[in-house]
Image (cartoon, rainbow, N blue to C red):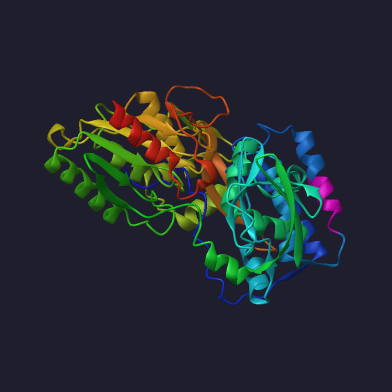
Amino acid sequence: MKKHNIVLAFLVPFINLYIGHAQEQFSREAVLEDLAFLKSSLEQTHYNLYAFTPKKAFLENAEQVKNEITEDSVSLLKVQSLFQKVISKANTGHAEIDFPIQPYIEYAQKGGTLFPLEIALEDGKAFIRKNFSGNEKLKIGMQLLQVNGEDVNSILQKLYPQLSAERTYFKNAKLEFWSFPRLFWQVFGEKETFTIQVKNNDTRSNFELKSITVGEYETVRRGEILDPKRYFKYMNDIAYLHPGSFGAIENSDEKAYRTFIDSVFTDLKSKKARTLLIDLRNHPGGDNSFSDYLISYFAPKPFKWHSKFLLKSSAILKEQTRKNNDTTDAYFRTILSKKDGEVFEYSYEPVSPVKKEKRFTGKVAVLVNRQTHSMAAVIAAQLQDDGFATIVGEETGDVPTLYASQFSYTLPNTGITVKVPKGYMIRPNGKEDVQGVVPNIVIKDHLLDEDDEILNGFLKMLKMN
């Protein structure tokens, strides 16, 4: 099947901090024009803008944002932050405006500083995930209670409007990915020092911390949470596959991806492996043509990643389709043939497995966590619903019945990129509840760190059986 960008990935890798950019300023009139365009374009392009938020509440929130635009000249950072508040009110994970990377780069080049702790959000609590403060008394896993005298939960409520998601669990996953230090800066601005309160067992302690530079932070944190790399190995008699991005980030060469998958399953056959672990944790998602090819090697019957897939056409979608896609492709031709605003079902033929002699017939388990995003969550649900694999780990942040099939366009004056879902997809079992993929075997991923509770816990279970 050709690539259709059914579910775009969560994000791109962090941009090189030392590329020069100039912070832009926009007139109040230009910003207000873009705000009006943002509202009207979301109504045109979003498959169902008011699915989770009533129209009245959405428009009232947009009006409140409008009232915050008072200066004659408005920075890109402020514009992007305000427009995030507008689009996030739809509570749709794939309707979003990304973190303001360009202003962040300029801030870094000027020697800007950040909060020196990363956090993990679990069960309504914030835990220290990484400590860059130099204070050795602060231990990984301590609970963070306050920052500068404000309760962490109160701070989170002020950060959430910058994040688009169907529910708090997914907002927390996105916050972990973008990182607390970055979002704290975006909302509260630069702080030279921080007073924090932490809890270790039943003991509360207060600490004074100095900020660290953005450059130092980006160096010592050692990359993003999401992992697009692909690799394969054996753990004794267990085969382990980390398939990498499904074309969502830099690994977009589908031919190279297929060659890699071919080699994996050829090796599995030659070594007569009986158990395969596929790791979709910290996965950005991507295109179904990549995941379909992987699944075809172990599926016992034809399969589809959805029970229903619906799309909404619009003038903006058609414009972007003509500009960015192969208009001879049947999928894109169908979009262009529909009237603006028309909702229609797009039918895919089931994907057939590879020939029996090439097919892997052993047991398959798929590892997931709260950072299993987009198409990765969708196919985890498909494998669970079809009984092709056992799902292991923790509930995914993203949901497998969702408004997705994301595409992008830019606002005319500010050039800010808006991402919007043009479609609605329902998981194979037909359930439409707003819930992530709940594993067959639940193992929590505490702190998202190198202590691999999910993999080690499941390997231990396999040895016991």
Q: Is residue 80 visible?
A: no
Which is nearer the eye, 212 or 265? 212
Which quadrant holds residue 308? top left
Q: Position of residue 58 (x, y in %)?
A: 76, 39
Q: Is residue 418 left or right of residue 444?
A: right
* Magenta range: 62-69
> In the rendered view, would you say 398 is above or below 189?
above
Q: Position of residue 328 (x, y in %)?
A: 37, 50
Q: Position of residue 242 (x, y in %)?
A: 34, 47
Magenta stretch contains residue 67: yes
Figure quadrant of the N terminus:
top left
Q: Magenta region, mostly helix, strand or loop? A: helix
Q: Is residue 392 visible?
A: yes
Q: Position of residue 287 (x, y in %)?
A: 40, 46
Q: Is residue 386 left or right of residue 61?
A: left
Figure quadrant of the C terminus:
top left
| Number of residue marks | 0
Which is nearer the eye, 50 or 261? 261
Residue located at (25% from left, 42% from top): 239
Residue located at (71% from left, 43% from top): 203
> In the rendered view, would you say 4 is above or below 301?
below
Which quadrant holds residue 164? top right
Magenta stretch contains residue 39: no
Which is nearer the eye, 300 or 436? 436
> In the rendered view, would you say 370 is above or below 134?
above
In the rendered image, the residue lying farthest to the top is 430
